[in-house]
Amino acid sequence: MRRILVVEDDLAIRNNIMALLRLEGYDADAAGDGVEALAYLRAGNYSLVISDVMMPRMDGHQLLRQLRSQAATEQLPVILLTALAEKNDQRHGMNLGADDYLTKPFQREELFKAIEARLGRLAQQQAEAQRLQGEAHRLRYLDQLTGLGSRMALLEALSGQGGLGDPAVGPLVLLVLGVDHFSRINDSLGYQAGDAALRECGQRLEQVLGEQGRAYRLIGPNFAVLAQVSGREQAQALAQQLHEAWLQPMGVLGEEMFIPLSIGYCLYPADADDAQQLLGRAEVALHQAQGLGGSQVLAYSAQMNAEAGERLRLNNDLFRALERHEFEVYYQPQVSLADGRVAGFEALLRWNHPRLGRVSPLRFIPLAEENGQIISIGCWVLAEACQRLAEWQRMAPGLRVAVNLSARQFASPALLHSIEAALDFSGLSPAQLEVEITEGTAMIDAERTVDTLRRLKDLGIKLALDDFGTGYSSLSYLKRFPLDVLKIDQSFVRNILSSDGDRAITQAVISLARSFGMAVIAEGVETEAQKQLLQQMGCDAYQGYLFSPPLSALEVVQQIGGWQAACKGDHHVV
């Protein structure tokens, strides 16, 4: 556009300028003063304003102030014309925002040189603005790492043509895919490997999807797929197809890697009314799938909303549970298979919720891990268990208490300090405290685990590996871990009488522990037959409902004397 507005009160000069402009092919309009010029500018778009300074009603300087104060015209080029050749007058105009100044009388060449300079600069500014707008659009709607559409692009696709509001479009399914335990890739291999893994996931998603739908990256390790389907069966089939594709290894920085994936999906209009609800409910389904341990596919159901709401309330309540004294430590006896004596206890956390009653640890421990409360809660459990055991020493000397450490607590720099503080405050001997970590926790960063365990060992604390056989630790690391106890998971003990495989695994664990000089405790023993078989295998101790369920501190005090009286002879500690 080359449209120019001429603002000049002198009719002869105004007509002369208009004639020159039209001869050069410019589209031009004329106004007699600043007030009239503003009316033109409100009614149309112009590329340039040429304005006299000295005019009635509103002069050029006043007009310039008006233009620079309004967003629509603040960048509009303005050339001022004046009969005054004084520099102060020109400086005043330039300070107000004028782009150029011509002194009357001026030559034709001067006028058009100024016009072309201003219009050329305007064209450059407009081109740069378009480039920046395009770049902003690309950043907003295109994920820079994977090249897939962004979350904003997904929401626009849902609300635009072919989206939820298009009557010509049938049922749609939105699948949200999340890489399970993605932080382990970053933690163990670095962020470069994590980025490479996400790029590989994006490429695989597009390859498998083909023309069935469009892929997007949401945030972090989460992706989305929007597809038109005939109904739930086709939606489920697509989800399974994508899930099965992730069972195959991926090449990440020259290494073969298996990247587990969970999927949650939601259908429109069956399960959601709008774009935000559709995306939110698909994400709820994903969280539920990952909460089941990962590598799952789940469709959204109305029940999930209630569960998600309850999960949010529980998460909020956890932040006050400690100060409100809602937690309680229960103690499950660990019994020696050699002489039947109670050798110690495992400390187990319980939450007495004021509204829900007793909340299962399976519900609140993962939440506490996520929100970080597990560290302060774990410190309290350590202090409470040490204090209780120190009190019980007077009734039953030599007992030991085992306290579980979560993955987050085990990785905390304050771990050793919290343990030393609990021992110092209670007066308990370090040899009577046993800390347990799971096999999964140990292998998150095996080298760091070795270092942390050695420092704990230097304190004189006993070390136990829980849930052994359910994870993926290697024998080379197991040999390096300075452990005192291996615990056989109850999943093996449960079927030890009926399953040859579980029986063989249990015997192998006991033999392995013996070769490394470790003691063995079996969890979840519920029958006399299980106990006798474990005893025959050479297991050192057991815990489970056969002897006692977890007990409150008061119940332990009430029964500890009876346990001591029931067993005569030397006290044996595992």
Image (cartoon, rainbow, N blue to C red):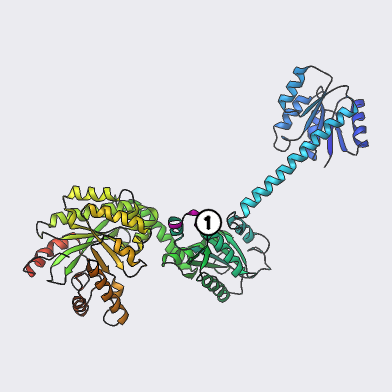
Q: Does residue 162 appear to the left or right of 40 in the view shown?
A: left
Q: Is residue 469 left or right of residue 561?
A: right
Quarter of the C terminus within the rendering: bottom left
Tell which of 419 and 177 is nearer to you.
419
Q: Is residue 499 in view?
A: no
Give the residue drawn at x 28%, y 76%.
Answer: 494
Per the rendered image, the range of residues in magenta is 188-195
Q: Magenta span has 191? A: yes
Q: Is residue 443 visible?
A: yes
In the drawing, does residue 482 fall left or right of residue 20? Answer: left
| Pointer 1 local density, CA inside 10 Å: few below 14, some 14–19, many at least 20 | some
Q: Quadrant of residue 42?
A: top right
Magenta stretch, main secondary structure class:
helix
Residue at x 63%, y 57% (from the top left corner): 156
Q: Which residue is mark 1?
A: 195
- Mark 1 residue type: Asp
Q: Position of residue 517 (x, y in %)?
A: 22, 66
Pick the residue in front: 251 or 263: 251
Is 346 covered by the magenta stretch? no
Quarter where residue 120 is shown: top right
